[in-house]
Image (spheres, rainbow, N blue to C red):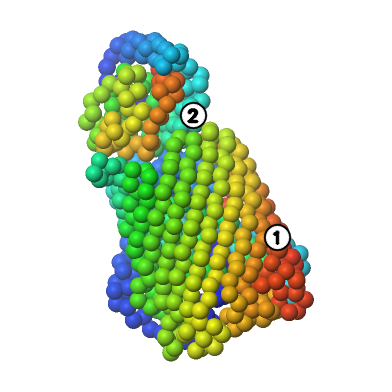
Amino acid sequence: MVSLPKTRGHGGRGAPTLFTCKATSLVVTIFLGVLAAVPARAVPSFSDQTGEACSACHVGAFGPQLTAHGRAFKLTGYADGQASRQFPMVSGMAELSLTHTAQGQDGGAAPGFGANNNGAVDQVSVFVAGRLYDHLGVFSQTTWDGVGHHIAWDNTDLRYGREATLAGLESILGLSVNNAPTVSDPYNTTPAWGFPYAAAKLAPHPAAASLIEGGLAQRVVGMTAYGLFADLLYVEAGGYRALGGGPLNTLGVAIADGPVVDGTAPYGRVALQHEDLQQSAALGVFGLSAHVFPNNDRSAGTDRYTDVGLDASYQWHPNRNHTLGANATAILETHSLPASVALGLADSAPGHLNSYRLNAYYTFQQTYGLTAGVFRSTGSGDAALYGSDPLTGSANGKPNSSGYILQADWTPFGKTDSWAAPWANLRLALQYTGYTQFNGASRNYDGTGRDASDNNTLWLLTWLAF
Amino acid sequence: MVHFTMPMRRGRILAMLALLTAALPAAGRAADATRGADLFDNYCGECHTTRAGGGSRSAPNLFGLMGRRTGTVEGFAYSDANRAAGWVWTPETLDTYLAAPKTAMPGTVMKFQGVKDAAERADIIAFLATLHG
């Protein structure tokens, strides 16, 4: 998954601390040990393991948007496939792009880049992904950030899942150990796997995001247990704990760059779904509650966040030529920030931040895709939390942003009869993001005369998977 | 490579009988193998191949399915349930299986919820019956 530029709203920098949680350390050690024990053979992938084309599991024959079959593959532990096959478990991914914003960014879009019209290798990722044992598999991504020029672990999910019959109901039961809330989720409505599936790193992005929208990603390790009962009810519950500064540093994450969970942050998810041969639908709720030290500063206690998400999705695929669908997500966050207030990072302890996303898509012949989406964030104002920095800040201290995203893409490979399948995969995407409001205002949002529409972004992406 | 568990002549006879049976009116209509081919492509084609002499993907090659015993495509790692079932694929067994695979054969690893529409099943079975040497 692409890492967007860091958002604010969860504190500033603080002093790193030593790793203090032995239990978490043990889990991480076992987790990394399992990954290290995986033999890396050539250039493997899930597709090679299963013998299926990418299109079997992914809408538009390219990740991460899942079909019903892809959700089943994930829930049963990434373990399907012919046991006798000698499949390698390493795959690669690269994103190369050109970014144009309506107005340039003074001083450069990022260190080493110009004010506008930048070409970049956004990221290069290596995946360890595949079956480890019966019903046990892993999806683990390590990413080199071509803009920030650093390497870090990315979305990681080690899971055990198998089919079972409970009280006469066909079910799937499983356990997941992962490093971000919603990474384990099988639907494309939750933050880890939601649209846009890739976004321009060299363009400005709204400053505010709820905690569950990536605030804890790769900064925690968690375990969740899940079940899909009668192909109708999906339930998942678990908790996340912070990783210490030492392990995080090893994994390429600076502990002081974001919130650090105190204790265990419970996570839950319930969804009702319907699937038949031509359509699928889901309606659900998910949520997270966390006490966090802002930027690992433990001198003033903790802030508390409670995020509740409501989501719905629909997918219609009458045949392999056509897929039409929509995803909707609303995340309602309430927070109390006494620690941030004491540290001067926020003016007011109580507050809220709501995030809404809606998108619709159509894919023709698993090759040509169109997606249109709208987004909106609203919340309580706080001049300290949402500072007045040029370009990235908010002059009125409000987090409100809104806009739309249009994307057209072409995915020539990844089908059952594709050339060099499953090793050669390409998506060319043209994405336009328009802002009607940015960091609190439509005009002069940062107090230096920059308008929301000045951040409108045209992004041409070459996305490779191999 | 597909191997039959019975002599080829018997297999061909069974396949012809299957074709005839599948062509019998189902729910008041004749089975349509052409439509069945399209349905097969939509529902089954991501996992199953049907080419004579072709290999298997994540699921076994279905060429010559009619008259074949369950779990017998060489080199394919079937579930215990499939190997132990001991069925011979006929229009009748296929109809039962395709309607609800996991109910008909508990323990099958085929991730497919089944074809609920009887007419669609009949069409798919009619198509499968055409896949013989």
Q: Which residue is identified by label 1?
A: A434
Chain where mark 1 sits: A
Q: Residues within 10 Å of mark 1 (few under 14, many from 20)?
A: many
Quarter in which the N terminus of chain B is drawn: top left
In depth, the one of A331 and A104 nearer the eye is A331
Instruction: State whether residue A206 is above or below residue A135.
Output: below
Q: Residues within 10 Å of mark 2 (few under 14, many from 20)?
A: some
Chain where mark 2 sits: B
In three-dimensional space, the C-alpha distance between marks 2 and 1, rounded to whole angstroms, equals 40 Å
Asked whether disc 2 touches disc 1, contact meaning CB atoms under 8 Å apart, the reply is no
Q: Which residue is identified by label 2?
A: B41
Instruction: State whether residue A69 is above or below residue B52.
Output: below
**Which quarter of the picture shows residue B73?**
top left
- State whether discs 2 and 1 lie on one chain: no
Please give the name of the residue rendered at 41% of the width and 52% of the height, measured from the top-left corner. Answer: A271
Q: Is residue A112 visible?
A: no
Please give the name of the residue rendered at 53% of the width and 37% of the height, measured from the top-left corner. Answer: A317
The three-letter amino acid code for the residue at tag 2 is Asp
